[in-house]
Image (cartoon, grey):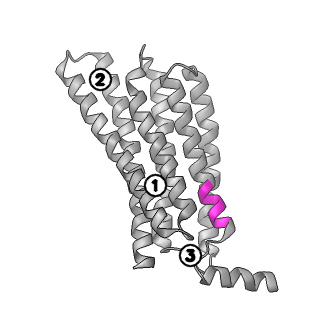
Amino acid sequence: MKGLLRRYLGLVNGRMDTGLEDALLDQLRTAEEGAEVAAAMVEGDVPRGEARDRMRRIEHRGDTHRGAFVERLSEALVTPIDREDLFRLSRSIDDVLDTLRDFVRESHLYELPDQSRLTPMLAEVQAGVAALEAAATALVEKPSQAAQSALEARKAGGAVRRLYQYEVARVLDGEMTTETMKERELVRRLEMVGQHISDAADAIMDGAMKRWH
């Protein structure tokens, strides 16, 4: 009974339910792991077939964490920020991982000989996911720090979009071949990942603003 009372008082004071926080951070860590696999693949450190298999397992774990988060959110008495913003955050993280899975699968199917040009885009993806994790960790105790980390994540998402624009301009400047069409599809996937990172950052910033202002 005392334990339940302490949990309730903690929630009322703005602390996130431990199970809810764990599920959200688990989601972010699987997204981070997915980004690492994708980066290793384009750098040639991991064969594409192996990367696809690893990504499939990572994405399955991500779905499990997403399900756990939604369940805990539905049971939570009080949440640190608006429920809708928390749901948006979780959904956007899920979209990041799903789109990375699609990127790795298409890379395996397209068999482009050299994908090293995509390394800068994936470096920004990794930076963005890491910033989201920092923001989620600081969400309750250090809201100003959470907002700053979310802003860094949003900047990383914007950097992915700019790199996408440069790559598309380069592709369109040359002869349109099957290879260049494949390149355009792959950079488009990464641009979508960047947008999902920005969406997740917006959910954190919106939620923090509603609660603390």
The picture places residue 16, in percent across and down from the top left corner, at 61, 71
**Side of 49 where 157 appears, left or right:** left
Badge 3 local density, few (<14 within 10 Å), some, or many (20+)?
Answer: some
Q: Nearer the viewer, mark 3 or mark 1?
A: 3
Q: Is residue 37 above or below residue 130?
A: above
Where does the C terminus fall, quadrant-wise?
Answer: bottom left
Q: Residue at x 34, y 24 (%)?
A: 183
Q: Residue at x 26, y 15 (%)?
A: 177
Q: Type of residue at label 2?
A: Met
The residue that mark 3 highlights is: 79
- The reply to whether dot 3 and dot 1 touch (C-beta < 8 Å) is no
The residue that mark 2 highlights is: 181
Badge 1 local density, few (<14 within 10 Å), some, or many (20+)?
Answer: many
Q: Is residue 165 visible?
A: yes
Q: Which residue is more in the foreground, 31 or 135? A: 135
The picture places residue 195, in percent across and down from the top left corner, at 36, 48
Q: Residue at x 58, y 35 (%)?
A: 55
The residue that mark 1 highlights is: 92
Q: Earlier in the sequence, mark 2 or mark 3?
A: 3
Q: Which residues are magenta?
A: 19-25
Q: Nearer the viewer, mark 2 or mark 3?
A: 3
The picture places residue 48, in percent across and down from the top left corner, at 54, 22
Q: Residue at x 24, y 23 (%)?
A: 171
